[in-house]
Image (cartoon, rainbow, N blue to C red):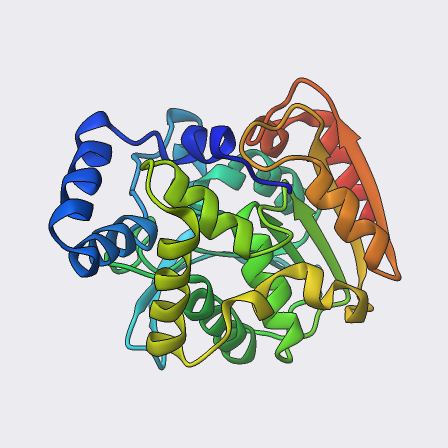
Amino acid sequence: METDSATMATHYRLPFFLRLSAKVLNIVSKSLTTKFLWNIFSGPIKFKPHARELGFYEKATMSMINTSSNRNIAIYRIPNDGRKILLVHGWNGRSGQFSTLIDRLSKEGFDITAIDLPGHGKSDSGQTSLPQITDVLTEIAEKLGPFDVLITHSFGGVAALNSIRLGASYDKIVLISLGVYEIRPMFENFVGLFGLNKAYYADRLFQRVKITFGVDPTEYGPDRFADKITTETLLVHCNDDAESKSEISVNVNEKMPHSQLYLTNNLGHRKLLGDAAVIQRITDFI
């Protein structure tokens, strides 16, 4: 299992009162508990940009695009004459996290497009989910593409892979700190943070996704389809990543027919985005 409860705890950093509230609700009403869990599970947190990201926001031109799901999505553009790159951040993230990488790629002449996912950054606030984010990425690729290269971080990579599964096309893909291999453990370990019955509430959350989006959540796990993605791919992961274990990328690399794996050390889950050696490897690859 690539994601355990300790990893989830690091990712969500749940305050004690939320865990206590879930346990009290569980005694009163399992239906209310399910709704409570869903609101947390599907509600990204918007963090303020770090000072080092401000140069990106000053340089990029931002616009909004309305998608078929009626979500207004923030688009950042740094136009150039080179190949077109689309960058997709992870859960609780924002486009500015790619600032150092974007600065290098822009100087190399690449045409840059980055987006804030639904519920993130400057995009509309509110709940979102993997199926919705997947649909948004597929739509963005259709409206603003074609793109030559796709670069993603963490959960954004899972959604991007699913958009490719559903028809989006790129010449090359870069997956940094890929967030999920199998879907079911992600639900179970999230429920485990609250000390509740994993099997019962994971099933309830599964049903919530099925009812809301009309899809089977397990079909969105890269374990189900990575072997069918033939795009040339570079997977980058840190061996000491505490939020998404490196075995996720190892497993996906073993399944994908045209992929290569670059493992690092002492960079965790996010420092890879600004590391000079990682940026050089990505630049060489694309």
Answer left or right for 259 relative to 197.
Answer: right
**Is residue 146 visible to us here?**
yes
Q: Quadrant of residue 42?
A: bottom left
How many labels were placed on the picture?
0
Above or below for 248 versus 165: above
Q: Whole-percent x and y of residue 7?
A: 51, 32
Q: Farthest residue in the front direction?
A: 27
Taking the spot 45% from the left edge, 52% from the top edge, the residue there is: 187
Q: Residue furthest top?
A: 266
Q: Is residue 1 left or right of residue 116?
A: right
- Seen in the picture, residue 132 relative to 46 is either above or below; the reply is below
Q: Residue furthest right?
A: 257
Image coordinates for residue 182, horizontal then vertical, percent:
62, 55
Residue 59, by quadrant, is top left
Q: Is residue 65 left or right of residue 139?
A: left
Residue 133, x across and y down, in percent: 44, 65
Q: Give percent across and percent down for residue 81.
A: 67, 61
The foreground one among 15 and 127 is 15
Residue at figure coordinates x 38%, y 56% from the top left? 200
The correct choice, above or below, for 81 with respect to 13 in the image is below
> Is residue 59 in view from this perspective?
no
Q: Residue at x 82, y 47 (%)?
A: 285
Quarter of the figure with the N terminus: top right
Q: Nearer the viewer, residue 108 or 257?
A: 257
Q: Residue drawn 48% across and 38% down?
A: 97
Left-right relation of 36 to 203:
left
Q: Nearer the viewer, residue 53 or 278?
A: 278
Above or below 149: residue 178:
above
Q: Quadrant of residue 3?
A: top right
